[in-house]
Amino acid sequence: MATIIAGGFDVYSKTQAAVQRLREVGITQDNLCEFRINPAGEHDQTPIGGDRDESPGAKDADKGAGKGAAIGAAIGTAAGIAATPLLGPAGIVAGAGVGGYTGSLVGSLNEVSDEAQPGHGDVRPAEAMVAVNADGAGVSADEIVRIFEECGAQQVERAEGIWADGEWQDFDPVSRPQLVGGTDFREHHAR
């Protein structure tokens, strides 16, 4: 396992400034990588930094939508048949469509669990990340943290992970980061 220090940046220019500074102190490309974290809720849209397949608590929503659509369409069709003298045959189709849509919405909402959603400190923000293999960098972990902070990192984390082929191989975007610095860290610890 390698000691990895990573900085998260909200602006690409800060990311590039950090990469430049890290190279200036002698960190080589094989001990440095960049990647992007997608926004929470935009699941599994990037090859690295993938996310969950769905939001916590939503795993049964599709089943509820299917049941609700079937029940709603049946009720809507019955209502459309009853309205045929006023609306004609179009009332049956409209009733089925409105009933199906309404039923799917209500059905899916009934199946969404009340599971607590993660708070701000539990979810990584959408950001550009720069990760450094501190074990191979030839620079102390404290120096890497300082450079990230001077370049405006929102979050700086320390992790133990697998570093191979110039990348943090086992990075988990939905894990809670172990913060050691950055503006978010300083604001939280200033309270």
Image (cartoon, rainbow, N blue to C red):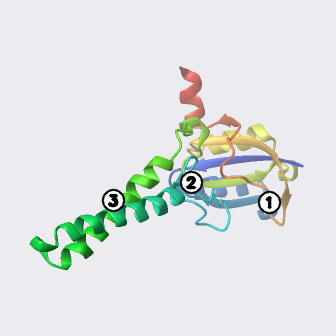
Give above or below for 13 relative to 146: below
Label 3 residue SS: helix
Return the residue at label 1: 169
Give above or below for 72 relative to 141: below
* Residue that sits furthest to the top in the current view: 191
Label 2 residue SS: loop
Residue 122 % position (x, y): 61, 38
11 to the left or right of 5: left
N-terminal of the pair, mark 2 or mark 3, is 2
Residue appearing at x 85%, y 49% in the figure: 138
The numbered dot on residue 35 is: none
* Residue that sits furthest to the left in the current view: 86
Residue 82 % position (x, y): 19, 67
Q: Can residue 98 be seen from the camera position used here?
A: no
Return the residue at label 2: 60
109 to the left or right of 122: left
Return the residue at label 3: 102
Residue 22 % position (x, y): 71, 53
169 to the left or right of 95: right
73 to the left or right of 12: left
Name which residue type carries label 1: Gln
N-terminal of the pair, mark 1 or mark 2, is 2
In front of the other: label 1 or label 2? 2
